[in-house]
Amino acid sequence: MDKHDPQSPIQGPADILKLAQDDPRRAESLWHGLSRPERLRTVLAARGIERERLIVLAADSRELTQAMAPDEFASTALEVGPEDAGALIELCSDEQLTYLLDLTGWQRESFAPERYQIWLPMVLEAGANRLQRWLANTDLEVLALLLRHWVHIVKFLPSQEQQEPPDDLPEFTIDGVYFLEFLDPNTHGFVAQVLVLLKSELPDLYYKTLETSLWEQTAELEEYASRWRAGRLADHGFPTRLEALELWGSPAPGESDWQGLPPKVASSRTTTARSDRVASLLPEREFLPALAGELDGEAGDILRAEMAYIASCGVAALEADPAHPEEVERAARESLGMVNLGLGVLSSVDVGKARDIVTRLSLAALARHGAAAIRGLNRRAWVLAKEGWLSKMPTGLHILEPPLDRWLAGMLYARPRCYDPSLGKDREYRAFINQSDLEAADNALIQAGFWGTLLLELLALDPQEIRGLYEANVLPADVTEIKLSHILGTWLARREMGLEGLAPIPAESLPQAVAALQKALKGGLEEELAESLRALPDPAQASLAGRSLRGVLHRLSQELAGLNPQGELDSRFIAGLVIEA
């Protein structure tokens, strides 16, 4: 069966599952007509519960499950959810199960036994052999920590004087030596079954586990368990936090010279079949997911494996909880976004060049280029806010008009964020992911810088005058609501009224100020101010400044358009002017 054959009834995972409902025998025949590598790639093209159904449909479901990379298996189990992942736990390899528990059984660097309890009942349900293998392959320190969480142990060794145990010992014992008090009635039955199997099938481990749980310090047990866990995760390509943070570092010397690099060479890890799950975290029109879908064979496998590593770096560096897929996706999206951004910077948004770059330069190097571009924005924003004209303003960046204030605020974060109004009011920021984000942020910084030029140089306003405007008893009463449009509107109104300097509009002069400003806005004021901008030495900056100024003047026109200076004006509801309260 060729999934690209237009005559084939099967074009993807959903088609197989639908055919399995309509014609199970034919679906089974077509499914098993594929080679195992082809079936594996079809499984990886599905998500969550569909993956599990495809695996169960196969006669070699155990081999198919165990052919998945450990991280692909873990993501599948988490996506399906503990309540429905029983079949996967039964079919997986010891290595895959260990990876899942290593990944999800800890909160950062702290052991979390209650998280093991989510998965271990399924291990028990998978049969005594499955449970015995897990016990035999699990670190002694982990077993001891789990036991300490589950039971209180009292050891009784009868003496010649006392052959019978005292009445105050816990009731449960398997061997008459260790008496156990279960600490949680909800895990009583499960823990008892584990201990019985451990004693009967692995007696040496049984005694070692109880003795270790009795006498060893918890901190020491956690330290050793953490060390063994870190080593196993590293073997599977999951980075330490320090290693992951290197993606946010500066590009190493020569990392821009990708043209002289040879094509990447495949390894056993990078040729493992992987899904496009990680690539789909970015919009499909972006360079990285587009190239992942375009590159076939070995080159495609290498790229997907690198993307999986970069996603894991995001999880480790940003300390996302691997047990929560939503956190994992957000962190992975940010690290992949840096790669995509670095790819855009190095390729100058040239598709052909981008394709050549990802086959030669590591994605980690691209991430560092992306991080460098974001840091550049962060530095410029901090200079503007802490050393530039905004540092002289009473409310700092609050003086900027929306959305300029939000753009600048996002760039001032320790992890600079891209302002994106399409996300909605409750969540306005996301990670930078492409060249357009960089350009929009760059424009916002230029606009913010221009307003300092306009106020302090072209209009020759004194920062002390502006400060006095904020310190007076005025409306708007909340000084963070006094924006550039208010300052410009107030200055223009006073100018049209023949008043010098910058000060609040006297309450009794409000009708005159509104009428004068309305007349000026209709009578060529925009062109007059635009003429003064032509003195700016940079034509591009002058053009951008002109657009910014026109935007504010347009806003002033809209705010004043419905007012009748001849009627009664309530200063509480007049925007665009600073008025004496």
Image: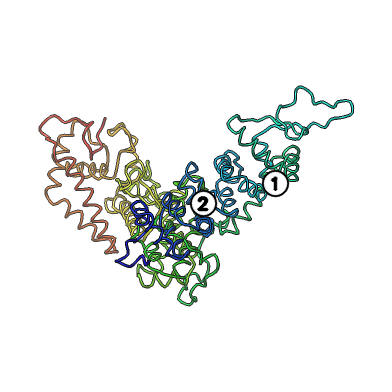
Name the colour scheme: rainbow
Q: What amino acid is labelled 2 in the image?
A: Ala
Name the residue that disc number 1 marks.
Answer: 140
Q: Could you tell me which quadrant the C terminus lies in?
A: top left
Find numbered disc 1 in the image and state the secondary structure of the residue it sits on: helix
Question: Along the horizontal axis of the image, is 422 left or right of 162?
Answer: left
Q: Quadrant of the N terminus?
A: bottom left
Residue beneath disc 2 = 74
* Secondary structure of residue under mark 2: helix
Callout 1 amino acid: Leu
> Whole-Å distance between the Cαs marked 1 and 2?
23 Å
73 or 236, which lies in front? 73
Graded by Cα atoms within 10 Å as few (under 14), some (14 to 19) or many (20 or more), the crowding at tag 1 reads many
In the depicted structure, whether residue 39 falls above or below residue 504: below
**Horizontal and vertical percent for residue 7?**
29, 66
Instruction: Name the one closer to the observer, 280 or 423.
Output: 280
Q: Quadrant of residue 563?
A: top left
In the visual, does 219 lie left or right of 358?
A: right
Q: Nearer the viewer, residue 183 or 436?
A: 183
- Coordinates of residue 353 in the picture (x, y in percent): 38, 72
Q: Position of residue 580 (x, y in %)?
A: 26, 32
